[in-house]
Amino acid sequence: MKQAVLKIKRNTKVAAKSSFFRVRLLNGMFVSLGVLIAIYLFMVASITFNIVNRKISEAETKTLSAKVGQLELSYLSAYKDIDLSASRELGFIEVKPEFVTRSGGIGTTALSSGKKLVKNEI
């Protein structure tokens, strides 16, 4: 009888230990399932927000493209009106270009009109 009691006690200890590990394993599985669900929800929300932002960006691109088209049209119409007489009416004057040439060694620089330039002091 004593052996049977010891055997029962031993079996209940083993059963208690294995049920403790089962509960712990089950809790770990629930925690990992919760983490995976949280990651899944984060990914779905991220994808959804990215799609919404892309659609908003596409709409802004369309409006900006239309504005650029209008600006190009106004530029081209204004470009036709600009000529030499219109610039004179605005007060601009035509300048005669002068080119700098080097006519000898280092330090002898002259303008195309024949004027000598002052040597740089540096």
Image: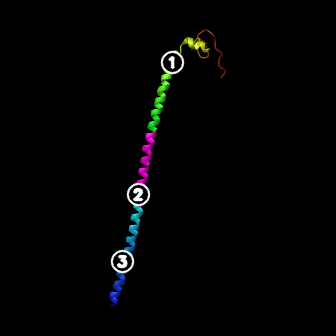
Q: Is residue 10 visible?
A: yes
Task: Note whether 74 is above or below 115 in the view shown.
Answer: below
Q: Amino acid type of disc 2?
A: Ile
Q: Residue at x 44, y 44 (%)?
A: 50
Label 3 secondary element? helix
Q: Earlier in the sequence, mark 2 or mark 1?
A: 2
Residue 88, quarter of the rendered image: top right
Tell me where residue 108 appears, x and y as whole percent: 61, 14
Residue 79, disc: 1
The residue sitting at the top extreme is: 114
Residue for badge 2: 37
Q: Amino acid type of disc 3?
A: Ala
Q: Left or right: where does residue 120 sit relative to residue 18?
A: right
Residue for badge 3: 15
Task: Note whether 93 is above or below 31 in the view shown.
Answer: above
Badge 1 density bin: few <14, some 14–19, many ≥20, Cα 10 Å:
few
Tell me where residue 73 appears, x and y as whole percent: 48, 23
Q: Earlier in the sequence, mark 1 or mark 3?
A: 3
Span highlighted in magenta in the image:
34-56
Residue 103, quarter of the rendered image: top right
The residue sitting at the right extreme is: 121
